Image (spheres, rainbow, N blue to C red):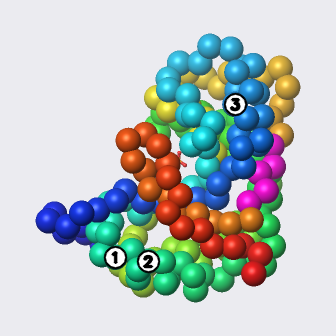
């Protein structure tokens, strides 16, 4: 859906949050990789994107919230085991990814994309790949890690975030457990 230029808007995305203790552990592990080129993502901004919406007129928020509330959820917390460090050079990202696919995550992403499509929101037509970004503007080879990454954020909600001045602010959240 295209933003109407005269309406106030917000830059939005749906994501699974990463709880503070897990974020701190990930950032601590990242620091063991030594000096990394690029821009490390702050602990409080770590997340697992489900769907990027881009600029959305604020008048669309009620409809968006209503649609998100109808999304079929797994019925339990989503545990995504992030156990592989990768560099996506085209995107210029260093990130953590799951080695094992997480079917409940993919089902949630699919359901969310379908719900948003009904409102006219279409994400980039790329295949969804679960990831947690660690560093932006990263163009180097994947660094050697002394200890293999193994983090399993335990998400009980999916969250609509607003991206504002480099900070991600939760606007609304929906339980994954109900
Ligand atoms: P990512 O690190 O998980 O890829 C807010 O802009 C967030 O939305 C970014 O941190 C990014 O999360 C995600 N995102 C996904 N697609 C995007 C896009 N096309 N442009 C900007 N951000 C995008």
Q: Which residues are magenta?
A: 151-155
Instruction: Please rate how many residues cluster around mark 3, counting C-alpha atoms within 10 Å: few if below 14, some from 14 to 19, many from 20.
Output: some
Instruction: Please rate how many residues cluster around mark 2, counting C-alpha atoms within 10 Å: few if below 14, some from 14 to 19, many from 20.
Output: some
Disc 3 residue lies near ligand 1 with CB under 8 A: no
Residue 95 appears at what percent x and percent y? Answer: 63, 38
* Relative to 9, residue 1 above or below: below
- The residue shown at (74%, 27%) is 28
Q: Is residue 65 visible?
A: yes
Q: Which residue is mark 2?
A: 64
- The residue shown at (24%, 63%) is 8
- Point out which mark residue 164 bears: none
Q: Indicate which disc, 2 or 3, sits on the residue closer to the N terminus.
A: 3
Q: Which residue is mark 1?
A: 60
Q: Which residue is mark 3?
A: 27
Q: Find out whether residue 92 is within the magenta segment.
A: no
- Separation of marks 3 and 1 at Cα, in angstroms: 35 Å
Instruction: Please rate how many residues cluster around mark 1, counting C-alpha atoms within 10 Å: few if below 14, some from 14 to 19, many from 20.
Output: few
* Relative to 92, residue 67 above or below: below
- The residue shown at (83%, 20%) is 146
- Separation of marks 1 and 2 at Cα, in angstroms: 6 Å
């Amino acid at each position: 859906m295209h933003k109407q230029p005269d309406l106030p808007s917000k830059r939005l995305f749906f994501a699974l949050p990463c709880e503070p203790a897990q974020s701190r552990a990930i950032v601590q592990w990242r620091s063991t990789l030594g000096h990394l080129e690029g821009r490390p993502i702050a602990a409080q901004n770590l997340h697992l994107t489900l769907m990027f919406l881009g600029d959305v007129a604020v008048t669309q928020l009620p409809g968006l919230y209503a649609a998100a509330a109808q999304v079929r959820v797994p019925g339990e917390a989503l545990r995504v085991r992030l156990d592989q460090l990768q560099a996506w050079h085209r995107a210029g990202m260093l990130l953590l990814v799951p080695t094992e696919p997480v079917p409940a995550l993919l089902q949630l992403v699919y359901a969310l994309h379908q719900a948003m499509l009904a409102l006219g929101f279409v994400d980039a037509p790329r295949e969804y790949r679960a990831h947690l970004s660690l560093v932006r503007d990263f163009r180097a080879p994947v660094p050697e890690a002394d200890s293999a990454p193994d983090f399993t954020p335990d998400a009980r909600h999916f969250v609509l975030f607003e991206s504002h001045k480099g900070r991600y602010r939760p606007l609304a959240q929906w339980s994954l457990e109900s």
